[in-house]
Image (cartoon, rainbow, N blue to C red):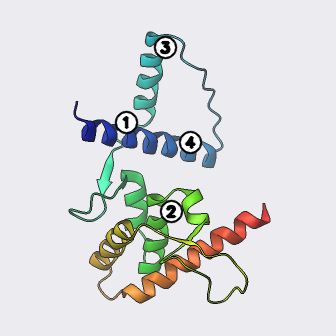
Amino acid sequence: MSEKKFQKRVLQLLVDIKDIIHIATSAGTAYELNPANTEEELNALGDRLEDVNEGAELVEIYPGSEVFVSRSAWRAASYAITSTAMVRCLICSVFDMETLLRSNLRGGKSKTACGEEARDGLDSGKVKAIMNAVIKRHEKATVGHLGQAINSKLAELRFQNKKK
């Protein structure tokens, strides 16, 4: 197996696990996961995960972008009625929470919160793929409007995280 295929498979498995945990916790289902000590137990655990998440796979959000999300995340984003809802959904599917909490769209200091540290910018290639995907589905959306929606979502996540 080539390194690229291996990395893609590992990423797919991690996304699948994340989806299973999200679905289980949102449905109130409890999973008991015991560590696999033998190869047979590991294979059995893999089979159980495949049974639970049958048919899950990665979807490229914009052709040629090499930015992938799980099929369920793509489906959820596709059902969004507005462009801002779709971009907010995709941003949370493409980036991990730690990255979202320490970033803003382009990077740099906040223009509204005085004294705050400069933030990292989100990966521009991934952001471009997200925006292209949203504009493809919502033709009247503008890059500026989507950028505002992304920064708004990031500020909302930071606020919610501070409350914890």
Q: Residues within 10 Å of mark 3 (few under 14, many from 20)?
A: few
Q: Residues within 10 Å of mark 4 (few under 14, many from 20)?
A: some
Disc on res. 21: 4
- Looking at the rendered structure, the kind of residue marked 1 is Glu
Left or right position of 164 against 86: right
Disc on res. 54: 1
- Residue 111 placed where, x, y %? 62, 89
**Residue occupying image coordinates x 45% and y 41%:** 14
- Who comes first in sequence, dot 4 or dot 1? 4
Q: Residues within 10 Å of mark 1 (few under 14, many from 20)?
A: few
Element carrying mark 2: helix
Element carrying mark 3: helix
- Residue 123 placed where, x, y %? 42, 66
Left or right position of 18 against 72: right
Please state which of the two labelled residues, at mark 4 or mark 2, is closer to the viewer.
2
Please state which of the two labelled residues, at mark 3 or mark 1, is closer to the viewer.
3
- Who comes first in sequence, dot 3 or dot 1? 3
Which residue in the structure is indicated by mark 3?
41
- Residue 147 placed where, x, y %? 46, 82
Element carrying mark 4: helix
Which residue in the structure is indicated by mark 2?
92
Badges 4 and 3: C-beta atoms under 8 Å apart? no
**Distance of label 4 from label 3 (alpha carbons):** 20 Å
**Distance of label 4 from label 1 (alpha carbons):** 14 Å
- Who comes first in sequence, dot 4 or dot 3? 4
- Looking at the rendered structure, the kind of residue marked 3 is Glu
**Distance of label 3 from label 1 (alpha carbons):** 19 Å
Can I make out residue 82 in this image?
no
Please state which of the two labelled residues, at mark 4 or mark 1, is closer to the viewer.
4
